[in-house]
Image (cartoon, grey):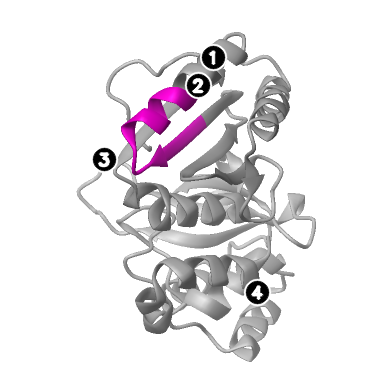
Amino acid sequence: MDWPRLIDFIRQRDPGFIASIEGVPAEDVAAMAADAGVALPAAYAGFLERMGVRSEPFTPFGATQDHGFAVILQRLDDEADTFSGRYMPVAIETDTSLEALYDHHIDLALSDGTDAPLVLLEQVSPVDEQPPIDLGETLGERITAGAFTQFELERLAERGLVHLGGTLQPGEGRAALAQALSLLQRAGFEPVLPPLGRVVCLRAGDVSLLAQVDESVELLSLRFGSEHALAVKSLTDQLLAGLPGARLPAGPRTLG
């Protein structure tokens, strides 16, 4: 992911938020990685260096998930004897009223140096002895999609949602994404942030759109919004007509 581009994107929409965030010095992030004996992907190191101390109200892992640097250091210290170096905690569940507490981790064994898959692991020790819950996205994809949703889509008066795929056929989600992008590009949509593997943020005129693949269920979600209801209806109709198998979600339309 391109952190400078993402920060500039958010600054244009909410300069007050950018002024309020606080990161961790790069040398402290490097020291944590060295002490843990791991190589952090650039997406996570960049997140800590920009938002590792304070990022409210941006909580990409959930409102009750604490991603602060201090709590991550404490977790690594608590698990020093069992930490294998594979599953790096990045956000800790704080709602102790839940029946089971699941924390967000990145799978360093599958990191490419830039990004890493995001998984859930229950707060039991050692974490390596339980199967991770694959979230079908990387950390960079989660942060990018979350920022685009919070600072763009949620600020628009009218919103729509269309789904495609979701029958668990391998590769179905990415194939649906390619099909949708072809249609959207012909309709004049262009990326407003660098596209990632399963997340693309687009705009055409006064319509903004997030295309996101959840590979855990092979589902493409197209979330979009505008200040004008007619623009949202028009795009909804265009997607349903132009993408075989496209459908409206069951139940109320939401951005989540």
* Quadrant of the drawing holding the N terminus: bottom right
Position in image of residue 98 (x %, y %):
25, 44
Mark sitting earlier along the chain (2/1): 2
| Residue at horizontal 75 percent and vertical 49 percent from the top | 110
Mark sitting earlier along the chain (1/3): 3
Marks 2,1: beta carbons within 8 A: yes
| Label drawn at residue 99 | 3
Mark 4 belongs to which amino acid?
A: Ala
Marks 3,4: beta carbons within 8 A: no
Mark sitting earlier along the chain (4/1): 4
Query: Does the stretch in magenta take in 151?
Result: no
Marks 2,4: beta carbons within 8 A: no
Mark 2 and mark 4: Cα distance apart in space: 41 Å
Q: Where does label 4 land, which residue?
A: 36
| Label drawn at residue 163 | 2
Magenta range is 222-235
